Image: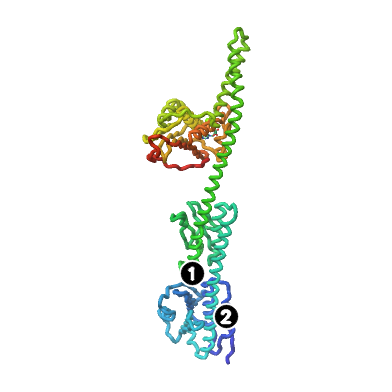
Amino acid sequence: MGKKRVPSRRGFSAAESPDYHAFSQEILHSGHADLPLAGFLRQTTLRLLEFFACEQVELAVRREDRCLRCRARTRRDAPPEVETHQQACDGVSLADCEKSCAGTMSESHSLSLPLMTAGTTIGRLRLMRAQQGRFSSHDQAARDALAQALASALFSQLDHAALRERIKELTCLYRLTQLAETPGITSTELFGGVARLLPDAWQYSEIAAARVVLDDVRYESARFDSCVACQSADIVVAGQKRGSIDVVYREPRPEMDEGPFLKEERNLIEAVARHLPPIIQRRQAAEEEQRLQEQLRHADRLATIGQLAAGVAHELNEPLGNILAFAQLAEKQPGLPRQAADDLEKVVAASLHAREVVKKLMLFARQMPPQKTLVDLNQVVEEGLGFLQTRCAKNGVALERRLSSHVPRITADPSQLNQVLVNLVVNAIQAMPDGGTLKLVTCAARGNVMLVVEDDGSGMTPEVLEKIFIPFFTTKDIDEGTGLGLAVVHGIITSHGGSIRASSEPDRGTRFEIRLPIRLPDDPQGASAEGEVDLHPIREV
Ligand code: ADP
Ligand code: MG
């Protein structure tokens, strides 16, 4: 037996034979390395190139209907060149596939070893030499043993890779479910969290980044910038595409099933895309419920304030009436000193003002039943605007009217409706100190008539918007507002069986939508929905 050694980069002389045993052991152990399959192939192919001191080594391994091939070549005065690619092997055996890809060197200088485990060919090793001579037939048995060790290592790598992918998939889906079930988690935390957990489940996690796009909002993991390869899946909620999931690699990697991505990764991204819609729907339902609860609480709060206001108004009404009556009586006394007459005049004026406030409180508390007749909403708007037009023009406010000719008459109190219009329009004018556009729309909508008053003025913060219907809530100076306008509007609309919605955004404007039911004896079904306007609320209460 000749002297055994693992050859250097220069190869070994004919007298020496390489230490197949030690090398086979090394290869066998490397099967347990935690490397992506392509990485393992590259590393092993380079080791084989050095061990056999050849010009070229090709290592091919079968993955289902595909063949992953790695080729390493020595180069003059440069490190060896390695390339990996995958191709379909459909129907053709690996051996045939190998033959068709064989190099151009003469057969005597090339050696092809099948890699088999349990009677199945899982790959093939091809060694090619041009100058160092033929492969010695003495080493045949040792080479076969090495091929077996290599087959074993490859098998364990394939097995490992499949298991690893499965574990990653399960871990990823488990973490996603955990995230979705975190109480009170915000959309940013949830979808941002999903984007952050995805890269770990991809083969080259160190260069992976991910992004979830939902309703045009982007949630990205760190370093989602440069991208050389991208794998995407659509998020489809109730049959509608609402966004996508994208996983990218920032650097090139060997070609696998789908660019550098694995088939398992395609399955995983699809699985995540399927997991998200039920989560999105559940969140939407919860948000809707919360909004309804909030609305209920708001209505409840207004009702309580209404009761209080009604009580106060009722208690004040009588003494106020007395003060006014007696002051007016006293005013009529002959020979009153001038000072006393002046003072009494002030008492009368203050009482009248206080009575107005009480009246408004009663309107808010629905203590003043509407005097109902058949009313044409368009006429109320036209007549109201007749008085307000000059004020609008003076403040640089352009009026835009879209009054539908299909608005049926409703049973309502015209003077109360006029009050609603005046209060809304005056607020709008006050919200546009530098001028703007005031839109007034009427239309019929599903058994209701609708009045929309919209301005592009200062708008409101959510905190202000929440309180606007509460009596005495105002953001204005004492001589500009009493905080009773919208409370009155709310009271009137509610006492007509209607509803009011406000939406607003700071610096963008405010929109009020009022719906009043059509209950005409000759039209019990209500009017058609013709002329309905599209609603895009900004932020509502
Ligand atoms: P007042 O006008 O006397 O302040 P309101 O009840 O009419 O009382 O309005 C309450 C508050 O709602 C106002 O002080 C203002 O802050 C806000 N508001 C009402 N309408 C608008 C509007 N069109 N644009 C901006 N803010 C408004
Ligand atoms: Mg007002």
Above or below, 182 against 34 in this view is: above
Q: Nearer the viewer, residue 252 or 395?
A: 395
| Residue 28 numbered mark, or none | 2
Q: Position of residue 130 (x, y in %)?
A: 46, 83
Q: Are marks 1 and 2 in contact (CB under 8 Å)?
A: no
Q: Residue 490: percent from the left, percent from the top?
A: 52, 34
Instruction: Decide: is 48 above or below 391.
Output: below
Which one is nearer the viewer's eye here, 214 or 386? Answer: 386
Quadrant in the picture for residue 17: bottom right
- Ligand 1 neighbours mark 2 (CB distance < 8 Å): no
Sequence order check: which comes first, mark 1 or mark 2? 2
| 130 w.r.t. 190: above or below | below
Is 452 placed left or right of 462 in the picture? left
Residue depicted at x 46% and y 57%:
236
Quadrant of the snapshot with the N terminus: bottom right
How many residues crowd around disc 1 within 10 Å: few (fewer than 14), some, or many (20 or more)?
Answer: some
Looking at the picture, how far across and down is residue 504, in whole percent?
Answer: 51, 39
Amino acid marked by disc 1: Pro
Disc 1 residue: CB within 8 Å of ligand 1: no
Q: Which residue is mark 1?
A: 254
Q: Between tags 1 and 2, which lies in front?
A: 2
Q: Does residue 162 appear left or right of residue 443 in this picture?
A: right
Rendered residue at 52%/33% (across/down): 491
Amino acid type, label 2: Leu
Front residue (pair 444, 236): 444
The number of discs equals 2
